[in-house]
Image (cartoon, rainbow, N blue to C red):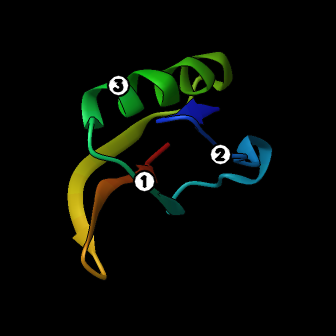
Amino acid sequence: MLIHGLNFRINWRNFVPGASFFIPCLDTEQALAQIERPIKRFNYKIKSQIVVEKGIRGLRIWRIK
């Protein structure tokens, strides 16, 4: 998954309900659009939130189902 020119590798099959990951990014809408493709393919339900972690802005994605 390419976000802001950086390749992120997410092990989608091991992304269990309750788990989360952080994607550092400035354009959160574009990043979320990239994340939605595999989410739809695996039929996952997620919650996303714009957060600042350790001084870095990005998206936190949780799998809820």
The CA span between labels 1 and 2 is 16 Å
Q: Amino acid at mark 2?
A: Phe
In percent of width and height, residue 34 lies at 49, 24
Q: Position of residue 28 (x, y in %)?
A: 27, 37
Residue positioned 30% across, 45% down in the render: 48
Mark 1 residue element: strand
Q: Nearer the viewer, residue 6 or 40?
A: 6
Classed neighbour count for the residue bearing mark 1: other residues with Cα under 10 Å, few (<14), some (14–19), many (≥20)? some
In the image: residue 11, left or right of residue 17: right
Residue 54 percent across, percent down from the top left: 31, 82
Distance, label 2 to label 3, CA atoms, is 14 Å
Q: Residue furthest front?
A: 5
Q: Amino acid at mark 3?
A: Gln
Image: 27 above or below 17: above
Q: Which residue is mark 1?
A: 62
Q: Which residue is mark 2?
A: 8
